[in-house]
Amino acid sequence: MAPGGARGIRGSEDLGYWVGELPVGCRLCMAGAKSVLFATGLCPEGCYYCPVSPQRRGRDVVYVNDVEVGEPGDVLREVADSMSEGIGITGGEPLLALDRVVEILRLLKEVFGEGFHAHLYTSGTRLDERALEILVDAGLDELRVHVIGARSLEAVKLALGFPVDVVVENPAVPGEVEELRGLISRLAELGVRYVNLNEMEFSESNAHSLALRGFRASGDGRSALGSREVALGILRWVEEGGIGVSVHFCPAIYKDVHQYPRRLNRRALATRRVFEEVEGGVVRWAEAECSGELWRLALAGLAFRVGEACYTHPRLAGALRVGTLVEALPLTPRRVLNEYPVVE
């Protein structure tokens, strides 16, 4: 049952809860069908709750799905290998790398077609009509504005005049219930259809800043105590008040439990080598010295020689009771997680 038993609130503890409809970007994300482009770590805002890691914050670096890249073609390959149906563009402030974002966006739309969905996060403080025209022309489908002040609201108003879905995405800050109610009421007046409330995260980079302001980490160690309750209270208020805005609460655990494993599983299926098996976003294969039965398998095309070793499917190695079983993340190159002797 939805929290509080309110009719119309859907979801689950780890997936999150929502009232109304979900933005397209969220729906694709839940399916593991979105790649994530970290366009730059540069940002002028300095939000005290920003969870971006020290390795990225303040640096003009580009990552796609946590892999650092140098060329637009690298983004293209990673998106293809992940069988993604869209991309979320984040930072930092992506508008500080507008030319880079537009170049990648045009390339993705050219290769994967207009149905390939793209959404972009921004505080809106640097958004103007020219930037919006360029982004929309390049194929942007959804704009997500983190409202931090009057300038952000002006950006929301501006974006509502363009053919993009406009989503406001803010953290559910403990103790700021009235502020969120006021914001959502104002957004409803403007005609905004979607609001996302993220559970406020504790991270390596913001833990000290949050602690100085009196926030405490919840039992899971990754979220701020009280953030979830604020968001769920807002959902009930929206539902019971009949406010015409769809609101989605996204918990901190969601990325680890749903988004990341599902994206990895799609990547594993897309890049699986013939001697690998896939389970839960992890690939497995067996390695052994290329001699005896494995050598005969190699001659028959059932094992593959790499240097002095033979790689084969875990079930074949298990039947022969030889070699080492390797478990790895389906990245390029594979990132080994575990190695242990093969057993039948």
Image (cartoon, rainbow, N blue to C red):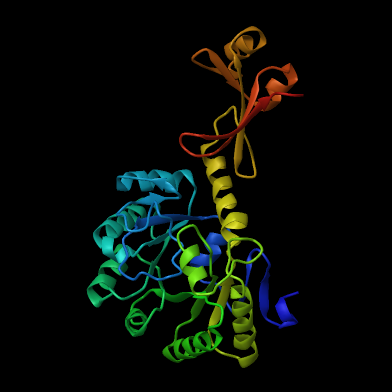
Query: Is residue 41 shown left or right of residue 297?
Result: left
Q: Nearer the viewer, residue 144 or 214?
A: 214
Tell me the quarter of the image containing the C terminus: top right
329 w.r.t. 49: above or below: above
Residue extending farthest to the top is 292
Q: Is residue 184 left or right of residue 99?
A: right
- At a point 52% along the width and 55% down the height, the residue shown is 33
The answer to whether residue 96 is visible is yes
Place residue 160 in its image quadrant.
bottom left
Q: Work out whether residue 295 or residue 121 is closer to the camera in this orientation and state it.
A: 121
Q: Determine the image quadrant of residue 43.
A: bottom left
Query: Residue reaching furthest front?
Result: 212
Q: How far from the left and from the top, in percent, is residue 34?
A: 49, 56
Q: Position of residue 280 (x, y in %)?
A: 64, 45
Q: Camera-side residue: 135 or 18?
A: 18
The residue depicted at 53 percent of the width and 70 percent of the height is 200
